[in-house]
Image: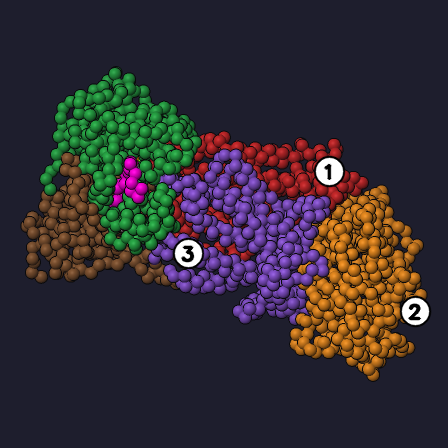
Chain colours: A brown, B green, C orange, D red, E purple
Amino acid sequence: MSNAPTALSLDDVHVRFPVAADWRGRPNRYAHALNGVTLNVRKGETLGIVGESGCGKTTLANLLMGLVKPTRGCFDRGGASLQIVFQDPQSSLDPRLPVWKLIMEPVMVNRRSGSRALRAQAAVLAQQVGLRPEHLDRYPHEFSGGQRQRIAIARALSAEPDVIVLDEPTSALDISVQAQILNLLQELRAERLLSYVLISHNVSVVRHMCDRVAVMYLGQIVEIGAALDVFAAPAHPYTRLLLESVPRIGAPFLEGVPQDTELPGNRHLPQGCFFRSRCPLATAGCELPQAMAEAGDSVVGHKCRCHVRCKKEER
Amino acid sequence: MTTTEQPVLEIDALSLAFPVFKGRIKALNGVSLRVGKGEIVGLVGESGSGKSVTAMAVLRLLQQGSFQVDQGTVNLLGRDVFSLDERALLAMRGRDVAMIFQEPMTALNPTRKVGRQLADVIRLHQPVGRAQALVQAESLLRDMYIADPADVLNRYPFELSGGMRQRIMIALAFSCNPALLIADEPTTALDVTVQRQVLLLLREKARERGTAVLFITHDMAVVSQFCDRVYVMYAGAVMEQGPTAALISAPAHPYTRALLRGLPDNAQPGQPLPAIPGHAPDLSALPQGCPFRERCPSADQQCVQRPPLQADNGDGRRYACWHPCSSQVTFMAEPV
Amino acid sequence: ATPQGTLVIGKAADPQTLDPAVTIDNNDWTVTYPAYQRLMRYKQVDGKGSTEVEGDLAESWTVSPDNLTWTFKLRPNQKFADGTQVDAEAVKYSFERLLRLKQGPSEAFPSTLKVSAVDPLTVQFKLEAPFAPFLYTLANDGASIVNPKAMAAHGDEADAWLSSHTAGSGPYHLASWRKGQALTLEQNPHYGGTKKPTLEKVVVKIVPEASSRRLQLQQGDLDIAEDMPVDQIKALKNAPSVKVREFPSLRVTYLYLNNKTGPLKNADLRHAVVNAIDYKGIIDGILLGQAKQTRGPIPEGMWGYDASLPLPKQDLDAAKAALKRSGVSKPTLLLRYSTRDPNWEPIALTTQANLAAIGINVKLEKLANATLRDNLGKGDFDISIGNWSPDFADPYMFTNYWFDSDKQGLAGNRSFYSNPDVDTWLREAAQLADQDKRAELYTKVQQQVVKDAAYVYLYQKNYQAAMRENVKGFVFNPMLESVFNVADITK
Amino acid sequence: MPEAAVEATGAAGSWRHTWSYFLYQLRKSPLAMAGLAIIVFVCAAVACAAWIAPYDPDAINLVHRLQPPSAQHWFGTDEVGRDIFSRVLWGGRQSVGVGLFVAFASSLVGSIIGCFSGVMGGRLDSVIMRIMDIILSVPSLVLTMALAAALGASLFNAMLAITLVRIPFYVRLARGQALTLREMPYVKAAMTFGAGRRHIVSWHIARNALSPLIVQATLDIGGAILMAAALGFIGLGAQQPTAEWGAMVATGRNYFLDQWWYAVFPGFAILITAAGFNLLGDAARDMLDPKLKAR
Amino acid sequence: MSWLQVVRKRLFSLVLVVIGVSIITFIISHMIPGDPARLIAGDRATDEIVANIRARLGLDLPLYQQYWRYLSGLAHGDLGTSIRTTRPVLDDIAAFFPATLELALVALLLATMLGIPLGVLSAVYRNKAVDQVVRTISVTGISTPAFWLGLGLIVLFYGKLGWFPGGGRLDQGMAPPTDITGLYLVDALLTWNMPVFFNAAKHLVLPAFTLGFVHLGVVARQIRSAMLEQMGEDYVRTARAFGLPRWVVVFRQALPNALIPSVTVLGLALGDLLYGAVLTETVFGWPGMGAYVVDSIQALDFPAVMGFAVVVSFAYVLLNLLVDLLYRWIDPRIKEVG
Ligand SMILES: Nc1ncnc2c1ncn2[C@@H]1O[C@H](COP(=O)(O)OP(=O)(O)OP(=O)(O)O)[C@@H](O)[C@H]1O
Ligand SMILES: Nc1ncnc2c1ncn2[C@@H]1O[C@H](COP(=O)(O)OP(=O)(O)OP(=O)(O)O)[C@@H](O)[C@H]1O
Ligand SMILES: [Mg+2]
Ligand SMILES: [Mg+2]
């Protein structure tokens, strides 16, 4: 897997949004959503992206989909076609369209073929994602959340993409439905040789689904590597903190002294390592910007952005 | 847990419905639940299973006229909530029972400073002046491990982070030392790192002050690490209840069991998850009998009859099922 | 109730401008007329207003035999409100200003008029052509004598200043003007007139709604209510302590028929219209009988009135016959009007109904008055409605203006009537000094134009003033509608 | 959002669903019912004027002028003896017609411009919005009066003038809608499919912006009727002999003291009709506004 | 954005709006058929006189030059000279504006003082009898032709009962207070002239009620929906959950927040009131801008109409600015944006 050809690549991508403007309408303050993301998505793999709220996951998804343009850096689609499934199945489906039109929308945008043929195609897709043919003429409000997400998945499939970006595809769903959707995604991937970019803050989902994971913090990838390696031996102190905080079934009762935890803001980027202020390992050298480097455990492809936890590379 | 003692909260076979466009939504269908003194009780269930409605019913916070109680009683500190008069109810709210909500963003008044909101509640239940109330509020915030309480008091909610706001809600809740705290998904909107801190805080304070907590969530993992006892709800009814560890390690109800098995934590990465087929029933057209019947692998003719919440032998567990699972399933966390 | 010694007159609208050389509106004259004096004024005969004139500022006058040079001797000791003497220079100044400004009122005077001050109390006017009504025009509001000193004090702004102030030698002068509310006139302390006025103050109160004016009059908040619709008058007649006074007036209402363009070019069609109108119905139904039907252009009360002309009356057979003669089938006529006068709309509706009865279709179009005027000037109508009241007491006002083909359009000949014979007679009459000869010519003119059915002559409306019973001494002058002889009134 | 909540707002779904939900809400609210009843009543009366009206509305009869209400003339007669009841009936055609036309035309044109502006964005958008701001800041009654005067007094021109003046409201509303909808995930999704503006507008924005626009238009009918009446009152509007409520009140006010019926009946007709549309519009807005949904 | 920036931005748009408004009114007023010069000259004026007047008014210039003259006058605060009254338009407006402003302000006061409690009641008792009554009142207000209501009130309260005066701002013979603001009520208070104060107040009752009644409906409706929205918010539930009594929740928590969005709506409505006064004024003979502008339109008095439009638009934009600043002041959340 690790030497599969690259489908997408991002190189040092930055995205910032203007959040305030002076009286002539010129922006004078920004939200720095992505601050140098370098990433490859390989053909056929599932790449997980985890990170806390506001770290830029959705922005990354939007960037991949072309909804936002990088302010700096470059993004190479390499000819791959992409589709997306959003977090909220309710609002990502137009309430005034019947299911079959919703499913076929990506096709109908580009091609005007007979509606009968399109309907037939919709029926096939619907069946693949586990919807019944009689659902085709209903409207989204008549479905449960899980079914709506199925519709959204069918819609993503209709354009026959190479890569599907899944932005928190199950976090609006119930546990009992989450499993159904995750299974469906797994099946489809096997059937259609898709690549997934799975964005989530749910570590368990990422662990379950992904070949590789990238951990994001404040618009940067702080650690990346094969899912097994990262979860088994997190290198970056942030990854550790994250994994420790995830509640787990069967783990002992919570212990410890509550602290006042603040997530960093992205209006003013910190100097040096972004995690420095929360980091238990912070030492001299952290005030410098950190580069991605091979993690200390010498596993191929496991990199992190921490000079303490990385192999010292001669620069 | 002794059951002879007077419970803080006792809900008995509560059924409640909302009349709406085209029918009635039967949100609760015979919920029975009790919270003992100082106990931390979890209430888990999927979206729409009636957790919030239960919580709101306890404090009679549901909008008047929008709902109908079909049967059942709610007993709060020995008093029947539905027959209390308005004044007695107001006095109980906040003083005897406090509640915190899911969205810390909107649960506080956006245009009142934090200090005033705290003082409002303190003064409502204690005969103190405003200055005194602010002093109390400050020490309360310090208790919640807030670094600079004086500054925070002077801020508006929107100037604070989500975690901070939830701490303030918790401070608000503990401000009058209530006997019961109802926490409706207090950490769902928070990030895991923050969630951990908030849960720790909540637990510490509840233990410290002997406050009972009814903790509502849909996250099994949180429950397993946080609660003494747990109730599992489905379609407005309790499916199963019992001490957390026992219930999680050996669920008796097929629903609980399926729920736990469907979690990715418990599966082999990449392998299909044992998902529950179908979806939750429509509350305005509930089928006869067991509400889980249509999705249950072990359902049969008997399930058309609604199963009562029956006691298991001895360990304080109860479940509503004709065909409970017997085999022990052990869910173990992998070592980190 | 109103204070003793103060007369409160209720009017519908604020004056627009108080500059006598600018205003052509009787509504403004209510204020300007008593604030200024003129060389001549209208006579009162037996306590009644008359159209004859007598000297006011002028003590005596002479005219040269060729009728071209007029010399006036001014009455001494006449003073403006600021105490300045009224002298020949002031007269010269006023007339030169009038002619220089060239606004509406200047139209009554020959533009080539020359004025010179012979000595402080003698002033001389020189005309280029004889102008029979000249003496009468001097009683006109436009001939008011303005105080040159007061004007000089305001330099360049003087003209603007005069539009909201008065600078005259009349019995009263404007003390204050609260826009849209009231104008207060106070006595001119230096007034040199023969009779001292008794009222201390005259307040002109602006009450736009007729019904409010009526209510205020009934409640005693007004002493005089002006400009009342006939229905309100009718109701007021029965109100306690209110007296409605009616006077025959020279204000006539008539229909313009477009003689020049459109279907009504056809004289027979015009005759059809003339014969179809329900004159009696209009007077009884719309005016509630408070008007007198007119026979021809010159109304009763003005010399030159021809009592021998037949009274027009509705004669549908004759109308149909005329229609047939005209050879026009199913004509459609455009009747344009405005609501400047509340009676116009009912008249228009009646006309429409009357003509429909003989098979003439009338389309009504109500316009803003300004727009209507524009259309009238351009001859852009078939039928329209108008009121006319004379600026000076001479039949010239009704004949030369209405029928001279030089005055087609807004100037006065609104029917666009043109008849060379009539033109000749009219122009001759304007130059003659002999009133009998002129009357003869005007009779000829009247007979001809009635034959040509140039206009539809409807009625001369009574002037009606509703006042409290205790208001005494009001004298109506048909030349001065809306003007109150406040110097004589007592209460 | 749980299904029940969706259902409770009625904001989503097919038109048939929305309609049946509308009827359901209507049945629950007595005021909305009253509004509907008024509208049905007024529209029926006005539509059947030709059969109901006992007299020719334009037939003048100077002898019977200003008669008080009686068995012959239910609402009395006017200053040239026309039957006011008949004229109120016929006049409704003008007034209600104007209301409907104005609401329809201004919402249509305004929404098209607004959607366009919102979707295009950029320079064009700011230019359009600036123009609308300017029109909005001119006193509307004055602008309408001036426009009506400029176009010439006729009912049609008055209608046109009111329409023109009301357009900016809809431009704003529709633009706001377009901007909101443009941010909706389903529109974002469509963008990722490579959908062009045409597709987005015709598939997503037009359909979803419709309901609030319709509600606003319903609320506006009452306002337009009042505005038309106001113009008629000032004398810019329907031409004689055509009956129109506002103009009737205007003439009637000259007779208000003694012949109260002249102004009262047409004025009351305006009030009732405007109230009917306002009530209905209120009800429609209440139920479409998800923020107001029952909790 | 700091408030200074807001002010700067608004002033910039103010200039734009004023220019735009003057262009629009200029075009429209020149579209109105009819020749004002002829109107001034009078019925029987000769063409020469008319041409003379036209030249004096600059009406013989090409349109763009006329507009340019107007605009450069505007830059110096000169709104031109009224055709009808031959006085500077600014003077005329200055004479009429205070009366309109006073009427509008009192009506606004009346409407808000009554409308807010009614709106609150209506929201609190949603779908109960109280709500139905309030909504009926508010819909009646919104749907009543103001001119018609005014007529009825005059007949009843002046004509029949004689309780209130039938028009004008003060009784005859009552001298107006020293002119400080032009608002009689305020001036009378400032100079402590109680008889005038009460008299002026008495004169205001009927017109202000007429105008305010319409507005009352707007206010009550707005407050009701804003209140309903606020009462559905989570913080209200929090307040209730902690035992705050219902009316405390309504007035101390929900109402202030409901007022925030309403400020904008009500502020804009004051603009509406200003020109809504036009009709009310004609009925009550109120000496304000209403009658002035109606007459001006009828008389084709372009400068007056344009002047009115420009002044009111100016006031409108200024008002918006004030509302904006007020909004920032009462809503702490605004400052955070940016
Ligand atoms: N259009 C925008 N304008 C301004 N700021 C934006 C915009 N979109 C995103 N941001 C900012 O960029 C940062 C990253 O946002 P993003 O939505 O990508 O986070 P996320 O990781 O998806 O968070 P979550 O888990 O909450 O969905 C946030 O701080 C957000 O405030
Ligand atoms: N006011 C109401 N009117 C109508 N239906 C309601 C109302 N409140 C709740 N319901 C319905 O009652 C059911 C139970 O809702 P409840 O809010 O208790 O679910 P929950 O278990 O808290 O779900 P979640 O995890 O999404 O918070 C849902 O189907 C909901 O739609
Ligand atoms: Mg996101
Ligand atoms: Mg809930």
| Marked residue chain, label 1 | D
Viewer-side residue, E149 vs D251 = E149
Task: Look at the numbered discs 1 and 2 and tell me whether their residues touch, using CB distance below 8 Å.
Answer: no
State whether residue B305 appears in this view: yes
At 93% from the left and 65% from the top, the residue drawn is C436
Q: Which corner quadrant of the image does residue C352 belong to?
A: top right
At 84% from the left and 47% from the top, the residue drawn is C289
Viewer-side residue, C358 vs E314 = E314
How crowded pointer 3 is (Cα within 10 Å; few <14, some 14-19, many 20+) is rated as: some
Q: Which residues are magenta?
A: B174-192
Q: Is residue C58 left or right of residue A183?
A: right
User: Which of the labelled discs sits on residue C434, or is there none?
Assistant: 2
Helix, strand or loop under label 2 = loop
Spot occupied by residue E127 in the image (x, y as percentages of width and height): 49, 35
Task: Look at the numbered discs 1 and 3 and tell me whether their residues touch, using CB distance below 8 Å.
Answer: no
How crowded pointer 1 is (Cα within 10 Å; few <14, some 14-19, many 20+) is rated as: many
Q: Nearer the viewer, mark 1 or mark 3?
A: 3
Query: Three-letter amino acid code at disc 1?
Result: Gly
At 42% from the left and 48% from the top, the residue drawn is E257
Q: Is residue D232 left or right of residue D30?
A: right
Badge 1 residue CB within 8 Å of ligand 2: no
Task: Compute the Cα span from label 3 to label 2.
Answer: 84 Å
Viewer-side residue, C435 vs E17 = E17
User: Which of the labelled discs sits on residue C351, or is there none?
Assistant: none
* Quarter of the rendered image showing ligand 2: top left
Query: Three-letter amino acid code at disc 3?
Result: Arg
- Residue annotated with mark 1: D76
